[in-house]
Image (cartoon, grey):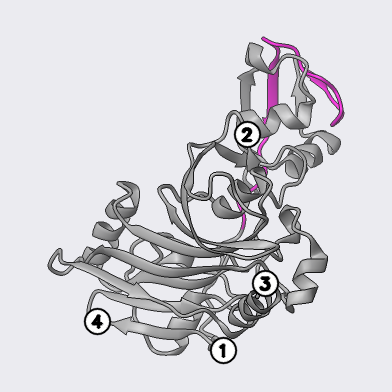
C-alpha cells in the first residue's frame, strides 16, 4: 500500500509580502530555490486553496499548502581506496587525515565520487557508529575542492566530545589562503551572516537572514597580485572562507565560482581554489590534553605559490 504524501500548511509571514512563490517556499520550508520552483511548476503548491505558478508573488497572511517531496533514499557508504589521502595520526579514539581535493567527507545525494569515510573503510578503519549512517564518525567537513586536515572519530566518546568542541567553537581550525589583491586592513575580522545564494543553489552568500559567521585573517606574505593569509574560523559554515573573502572583493585565487580572475589561476597553473586546512587543534577526547596537527601544502598549491613569489621578486 502506497504511503500518502505529507501535506504541510503555513501562513505567509508579512515580511515575505511580494516575494516570488519559489523564494517564499525556500525561506519557509528550507527547500532550494530549484526544488521550490519544481514543486510549484508541478502543481504541488497551493496558495489560499488555488494552484500557483513558480513566478507568482505571495501575500502576507495567505496560506501556502505544499505536498512535501518524498525523503531521499538512504545513501550507502562504499569502501573505496582514496588516492592521495594521507593518514597523519591514528589512535584508539581518532584518526587524522590529510584530504586531497576531489574527495568529499561522506556520501551524499548527487555525489558519486570518493569519500573520506569510504577511504577509511577500504583501509580497514572502524569509526564511531554515532551520526547518520552515511556520515558515521564525521564531526566536521571540508569542501570537495579544499584540501587539508580532518579529524574523524573512532570511538563513541570521541564523537561526543569532539562534536561538543566544534559546537562550542573551542577547536582551532587554521587555513592558508592565497587571495587576490591586498585586504585592507591586512589583518582583521569578517563578521557577516552566510546563507544560501538567492539565485544559484550551488553557492552561498552573505545574506541578511543567514547564520552568524566569523572569519579572522592575518597577512603572512604579500605579492604583487595576491596575498597569502592565515585564516582562523570561529564558525564553520559551508564555503565560509570563500564566501567571506569574495564578499570583501578578495576571492581565493582560482575560485572562479566566487568571482576569481581565471587568467591569474591559469598563469599559476591552478585548477582549483588556493585554500588548504593547514592546522587543527583540539582537546584530545581520551585525556583532555591539547593536541595539534599540521599539513604541508599539496604540490599544486606549492607550485602556484612558488610562481607568484618568483613573479614578485
273 or 304: which is nearer to us? 304
Left or right of 275? Residue 155 is left
Task: Name the residue tied to disc 1.
Answer: 83
Is residue 221 at least partly visible in the picture? yes
Number of residues whose C-alpha sits closer than 10 Å to that of mark 3, classed few (under 14), some (14–19) or many (20 or more):
few
The Cα atoms of the two marked residues, 2 and 4, are separated by 41 Å
Secondary structure state at the residue bearing disc 2: loop
Q: Nearer the viewer, residue 48 or 98?
A: 98
Say which label, 1 or 2, has the lower sequence index.
Answer: 1
The image quarter in which residue 7 lies: top right
Question: Which secondary structure lies at badge 1?
Answer: loop
Q: Is residue 281 above or below residue 299?
A: above
Which is more toward the observer, 293 or 7? 293
On the image, the x and y values in percent for residue 307 come to: 68, 79
Q: What segment is highlighted magenta in the picture? A: 49-72
Task: Please report the residue visible at 60 percent of the width from the left and 49 percent of the height from the top.
Answer: 183
Q: Quadrant of residue 6?
A: top right
Amino acid at each position: 500500500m502506497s504511503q500518502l504524501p505529507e501535506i504541510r500548511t503555513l501562513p505567509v509571514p508579512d515580511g515575505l509580502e511580494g516575494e516570488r512563490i519559489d523564494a517564499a517556499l525556500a525561506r519557509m520550508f528550507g527547500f532550494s530555490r530549484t526544488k521550490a520552483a519544481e514543486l510549484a511548476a508541478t502543481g504541488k503548491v497551493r496558495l489560499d486553496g488555488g494552484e500557483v505558478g513558480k513566478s507568482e508573488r505571495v501575500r502576507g497572511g495567505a496560506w501556502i499548502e505544499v505536498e512535501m517531496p518524498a525523503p531521499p533514499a538512504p545513501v550507502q557508504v562504499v569502501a573505496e581506496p582514496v588516492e592521495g589521502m594521507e593518514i597523519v595520526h591514528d589512535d584508539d579514539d581518532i584518526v587524522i587525515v590529510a584530504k586531497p581535493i576531489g574527495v568529499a567527507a561522506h556520501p551524499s545525494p548527487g555525489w558519486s565520487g570518493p569519500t573520506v569515510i569510504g577511504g577509511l573503510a577500504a583501509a580497514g578503519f572502524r569509526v564511531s557508529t554515532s551520526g547518520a549512517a552515511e556520515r558515521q564518525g564525521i564531526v566536521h567537513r571540508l569542501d570537495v575542492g579544499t584540501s587539508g586536515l580532518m579529524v574523524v572519530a573512532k570511538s563513541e566518546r570521541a564523537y561526543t566530545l569532539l562534536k561538543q568542541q566544534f559546537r562550542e567553537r573551542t577547536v582551532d581550525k587554521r587555513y592558508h589562503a592565497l587571495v587576490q589583491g591586498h585586504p585592507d586592513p591586512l589583518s582583521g575580522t569578517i563578521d557577516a551572516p552566510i546563507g544560501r545564494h538567492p539565485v544559484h543553489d550551488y553557492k552561498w552568500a552573505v545574506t541578511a537572514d543567514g547564520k552568524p559567521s566569523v572569519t579572522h585573517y592575518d597577512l603572512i606574505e604579500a605579492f604583487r597580485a595576491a596575498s597569502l593569509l592565515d585564516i582562523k574560523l570561529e564558525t564553520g559554515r559551508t564555503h565560509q572562507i570563500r564566501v567571506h573573502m569574495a564578499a570583501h572583493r578578495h576571492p581565493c585565487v582560482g575560485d572562479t565560482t566566487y568571482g576569481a580572475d581565471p587568467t591569474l589561476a591559469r598563469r599559476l597553473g591552478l585548477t582549483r581554489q588556493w585554500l588548504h586546512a593547514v592546522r587543527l587543534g583540539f582537546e584530545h577526547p581520551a585525556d583532555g590534553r591539547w593536541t595539534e596537527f599540521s599539513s604541508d601544502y599539496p604540490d599544486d598549491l606549492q607550485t602556484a605559490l612558488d610562481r607568484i613569489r618568483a613573479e614578485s621578486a
